[in-house]
Amino acid sequence: MPCNVFITGATGYLGRHVAEALLTRGHAVRALVRHGSAGKVPAGCAIVVGDPFDRRTFTNAVAQGDTFLQLVGVPRPSPVKAREFVQIDLRSAGESIRAALAASAAHFVYVSVAQPAPVMRAYQAARREAEVALRASGLRHTILRPWYVLGPGHRWPAALLPFYWMMERIPSTRDAARRLGLVTLPQMVSAVVHAIEHPPDHSRIVEVPQIKQLVN
């Protein structure tokens, strides 16, 4: 059944590909963009001009029964961007959750990050706080937790694949290696689309091993 999907972050690395996949599969997509960014959104999306950090600018564009997909985040996260994770990732997630709740959205899909992990702790903390807010909202929701998404311009961790292969064969490190494993952009897009097309009864968390298996 076709879904009506409201996306924040549709101009980003993951968002553009997810929006295109949803349109191809017959879903209606509305994309929240800032002034001057409409040209970055895939053709076929309905454009909603607004500020992802101010729900008052877009709540009225979210319809009752929509699926709300939250993808706004700091590009190319790194440990030096701790303040940005709070100001961008966490702040936008909070505004989106409140907007979805006010509009009676049917399903909220949030792309978080795999956790716990020994690095990128500020990033994990911001995303974890957003997860807590989402659970507290009472919205039906899906949380996806990738670690790193390999794709165009995002390939350097591929050099670590032999290391992951080895760690997965050691009992004491196997679980962590699988939970913090690398996923490809097509795998991640497929997992997000699958989450939208198959909402849970109430809540669901999708970790890296499941992301790798969800192929539409």
Image (spheres, helix red, strand yellow):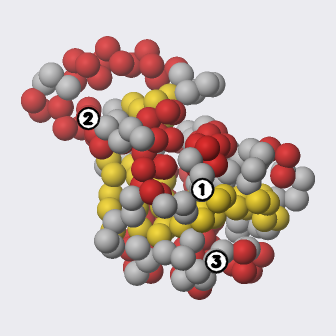
- Write the residue at 71% across / 58% down: 31
Q: In this view, does 188 lie to the left or right of 165?
A: right
User: Closer to the camera, 125 or 106?
Assistant: 106
Query: Which disc is residue 178 wearing?
Result: 2
- Write the residue at 33% across / 73% down: 202
Amino acid type of the residue that numbered disc 3 sits on in the rendered structure: Ala
* Mark 2–mark 1 distance (CA, rounded to whole Å): 32 Å
- Write the residue at 46% across / 23% down: 157
Amino acid type of the residue that numbered disc 1 sits on in the rendered structure: His
- Say which residue label 1 marks: 27
* Mark 3–mark 2 distance (CA, rounded to whole Å): 38 Å
Judge whether residue 68 can be spotted in this image.
no
- Say which residue label 3 marks: 63
Amino acid type of the residue that numbered disc 2 sits on in the rendered structure: Arg
Question: Quick one: label 3 or label 2, which is nearer the N terminus?
Answer: 3
Crowding near pointer 3: few (<14 within 10 Å), some, many (20+)?
A: some
Crowding near pointer 2: few (<14 within 10 Å), some, many (20+)?
A: some
- Write the residue at 13% across / 24% down: 170
Q: Is residue 170 left or right of residue 209?
A: left
User: Closer to the camera, 149 or 126?
Assistant: 149
Q: In this view, does 113 lie to the left or right of 154?
A: left
Vertical side of 97 occupied by 205: above or below: above
Q: Is mark 1 on a helix, strand or loop?
A: loop
